[in-house]
Amino acid sequence: MATGVETDRTLAHGSRESGPEAPAPGSQELVAGPIPNVRPLRLAFVVQRYGEDVNGGAEAHCRLVAEHLARAHRVEVLTSCARDYITWKNERAPGLDKMNGVPVRRFKVKRPRDPDRFGRCSQKVFLGKHRPEDELLWLEEQGPFSPALLRHIRRRENDYDYFIFFSYRYYHSYHGIKAVPRKSILVPTAERDEVVSLGIFRDLFRLPRAIVYNSIEERAMIWSASGNRSVPGDVVGVGSELPANADGDAFRRKFEVARPYTLFVGRVDPNKGCRTLFHYFRRYREETGSALDLLLVGGKQMEVPAEPGVRYLGFLSEQDKWGALAGAELLVMPSELESLSMVTLEAWGMGKPVLANGKCEVLRGQCRRSHAGLYFDDYYEFREALSLLEQNPDLRAGLGENGRRFYHQNYRWDVVEGKYNRILETLSRDDRALPPAPKTGFFARLFS
Amino acid sequence: MSTFSAKGTDIDVEAIMANIRRKIEEKRKGLYTEDEVREIAEMKLDAVLEASEFNSDFVAAFRARDEKWNYRFDPETIYASSHAGGGGLIRAARRLLNPVLKLFFNPNPVISALSRQADLNRYYVLLLHNMAQELTRANLELTNLKARLRTLGIRVDFQGKREKTMEQVVLERESREPREPRPLPPRSSDRPEPSERQERGERTERSSERGERDRGSERRDRGASSERPERGDRADRDRGERGDRERGERDGGRRGRGRRSFRRRRGGGGGGGGSNRGDSSGRPPGGNRSGGGSSGPREGSGGNRS
């Protein structure tokens, strides 16, 4: 394992302070030296749901990384047949499938989630005294409970060089990493909630060969929750493909948007801070008499108030989404729980400033490191920050430019792929240096 | 995608956020309008309601639709029927049977109590609303007062430090200068020169003490020094600075022998202490703030320093 070696310089370019996603002292950094000549590896991406129609940050993250790494490696995705993350109902056919050129192997979920039982388990685990067995039961009740997927991982371990597990909090990651710890790489996609401090995960974070974090804040949180500094890891995140010709004017014409607007992209959901956003925005308009509109793009889990200046556009095509970003004055991200906001990175990639919820450590940290966004903790900060951004085009342009630089230095796909490849190369180099593991089984030993 | 100006590269988000916070803090120090107070109070209520998973529009709905949460009660209510068609008949029958009902119990106190309760409910809602507003206002005022207190505290600390620095400067200057009596500029024509004044005061004191009691010279000296602050005090009153402090001190000096003996043990002067011992130190009486502290030990130390 390459430890203590000089970190990739490309990470720190353009940052006026430390590198935007610079390594922390004492950590085991995997990213070292130039991008290696990639030796094709057999990789299994293990994720709770998979598909283009699956809406979820971690799932989309996994899909994008899998599709990009499939260019250099033999990638297979192991996932459940579920589409809905609440019921885990089997909605897709089990077996091998192919999506965007990536083989996807689906396994049935043995039983869907029982909300009552899961609620009772959650209450016990998060509100009362409990034992590790209760936490394991909670994990099982949370789902997706798919023993078939685990059986496949155990039986076909030798068919893969590495297993890349996404989302630490699900059944497949916990038991999968326990089954193949020497071959596992974890992408935790952890948020600051009560789950991260459960005892079972404290041990889990020490097991994998490497951990790929989404942000410095996520890494710090996991370090403090589990004390797993010795596990090698790096802050990578996810990349994004920027369109060559995003047309803000075309979007304005198509959707008849005449006034300047601030954009929200994502699930319109109270859990994403939308209720607060509506409340704050209404007050902001009332108090300042601003002509700024709020445009909402994405799925809807709550009623959008019928107020002047607030407009819900629903799901948009990729082209329209990029057009909306290109035409926006700024992006607003009111969510408190984000392990990595892809849309924030995309806005920065498009050179747009961001107004983020400062209570979300990741967003706040990224705004501070990139110098590309302002943040708010309460309404008064929201009002001042939005007013400043609205009235100051130079500031918007400057923040946007910083954002674009931050994106290009850290979240372009070649940067992200390079980081993954370096991690894989380092691990496989270490594995090659190790003596071969003794073969198990009587006949294997006999004929070896 | 548009192109951006190069000015942005110098932007420091943390500095901007610090500015925003400073601005908000300044606004908070100022006065709040009635509307702002109401809004803040409502926000607090909203937070409480949201924490209990109530609908956030609950307060507005509560206020708007009285009949949803409060009942109307009048003498006819007990005879009313919710049936649409036969309601009239039922009501008439109940009214007809009212005399029979009254044989069993008297419904009038119940009716009056319930109508009164309905009025009270409305009154309580109003009261709670006003109390929430008042509480918010009081909280804001408290925040303002805290901020002012903090500012005053800082100023007092600063003054204290300044005073000490000045004392040091004076002490250092005097330690460098030759220790000869320095004449004070005359304040008024009838006022004697400081050294003369001190001598005269000393003599007067000594003679009076001699006249009253026959004590040792050491005791006389101390008696003289304890009396001097009266004159020093007069001079201070002119300056309008230390009057109260030294008056208290003087009273303390007069009050008991215990304190004098304490000072004697510490080797300090009496009453005005070192500050007014212009005869021995060469410092002008009453003109030195450094030695003339307000408390005994401080005086003692001032005396020693001189």
Image (cartoon, grey):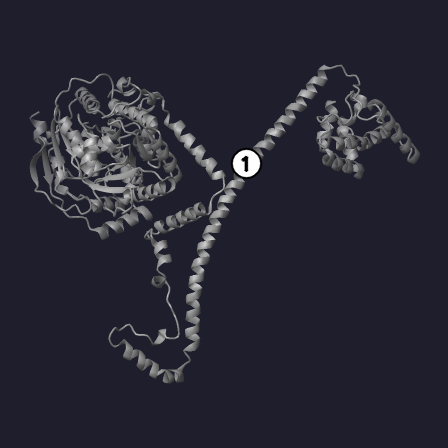
Foreground pick, A295 / A173 = A295
Q: Quadrant of the C terminus of chain A?
A: top left
Foreground pick, A321 / A186 = A321
- The residue indicated by pointer 1 is B150
Percent across and percent down for residue A95 are: 7, 39
Q: Quadrant of the N terminus of chain A?
A: top left
Q: Is residue B8 left or right of A166 when viewed as pictured?
A: right
- Relative vertical location of residue B87 with respect to residue A12 in this rendering, above or below: below
Residue density around tag 1, few if under 14, some if 14–19, many if 20 or more, within 10 Å: few
Determine the image quadrant of residue B150: top right
- Relative vertical location of residue A6 with respect to residue B29 in this rendering, above or below: above
Residue found at x 39% / y 70% = B73
Q: Is residue A357 visible?
A: yes
Percent across and percent down for residue A240 are: 20, 28
Foreground pick, B107 / B36 = B36
Amino acid under label 1?
A: Arg
Q: Is residue A165 visible?
A: no
Secondary structure state at the residue bearing disc 1: helix
Residue found at x 10% / y 39% = A106
Residue found at x 35% / y 52% = B52
Foreground pick, A344 / A48 = A344
Percent across and percent down for residue A308 are: 29, 44
Percent across and percent down for residue B79 are: 34, 76
